[in-house]
Amino acid sequence: MPQLSCQNLTIGYEGKVVVSGLSFDVNAGDYLCIVGENGSGKSTLIRTILKLKAPMSGKIFTESTGSTGNTGSIGSGLMPNEIGYLPQQTVVQKDFPASVREVVRSGCLNRCGLRPFYNKAEKRIAEENMEKLGISSLAKRCYRELSGGQQQRTLLARALCATRKLLLLDEPAAGLDPKVTAELYTLIGDLNNDGTTIIIISHDICASVKYASHILHIGNRSVLFFGTKEEYLKSETGRIYANMSGGKS
């Protein structure tokens, strides 16, 4: 069974439909890139998967839950708090006055329950993820003093502390220079190669084509394409957008 399955979703906000007819499956180990114009519903879809917003209609299922018949339900196979989430950064978040270690450890909060402290296992997970993302030497640094790329590595390590099953990333390279962007996409690709399922929103068609296994292209209130990267490049939509961005490779 797919790790995540969206069936005939209609999503929107304030009663306004943004996109309808969303149906796609994500299997364990996939790298799904969601592309589309601004306002096409990409971030709304992510928030709906996380149950931060209710779908207007349709269903979301996860592995081992089967069809429950409940609109927009996420069952016990993969709960929202088992999904690592890296949202777009706000100005307030960039100025957060905490150390890198504190920020990364906060990804374990859902594991703590009512405990007001991190146990040894949770602290170890944080240290392992800092090492994996190459930021161990920054552990005592204040988060707001870091460069944009270092901040994104810190937030990615935090997301990994929540889970290594599935990561949802909303424009993780926004505002980064080309060199740092390439390094970040390489890191995300490495995580995927290690078995983490990736769902990423990106305006970078070139990076999408390079790293993704599947593409979901949405726009104009409808699904323009869903399928493998290879199928996307052969499709009319894929050819147009890949050629526009120089991603024909």
Image (spheres, rainbow, N blue to C red):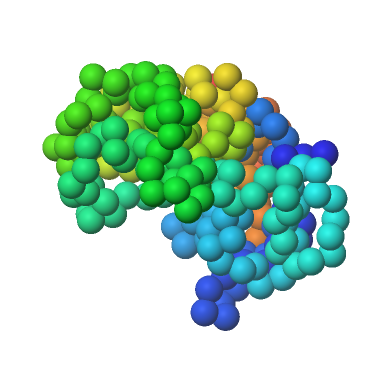
85 in relation to 56, above or below: above
Which residue is located at x 22 percent, y 37 percent?
A: 99
Q: How many marks?
A: 0
Q: Is residue 198 left or right of residue 90?
A: right
Front residue of 157 and 46: 157
Q: Is residue 165 visible?
A: yes
Which residue is located at x 80 percent, y 49 percent?
A: 65
Which residue is located at x 57 percent, y 19 percent?
A: 194
136 in relation to 227, above or below: above
The location of residue 130, given as percent across then percent down, is: 36, 25
Front residue of 68 and 234: 68
Residue 180 location, quadrant: top left
Residue 56 location, quadrant: bottom right
The location of residue 38, given as percent across then percent down, is: 44, 57
Which residue is located at x 61 percent, y 55 percent?
A: 49
Front residue of 115 and 140: 115
Q: Is residue 248 left or right of residue 177?
A: right
**Quadrant in the picture for the C terminus:** top right
150 in relation to 48, above or below: above
Residue 29 location, quadrant: top right
The location of residue 210, given as percent across then percent down, is: 52, 25
Q: Is residue 120 left or right of residue 197?
A: left
Front residue of 103 and 12: 103
Q: Is residue 243 visible?
A: no
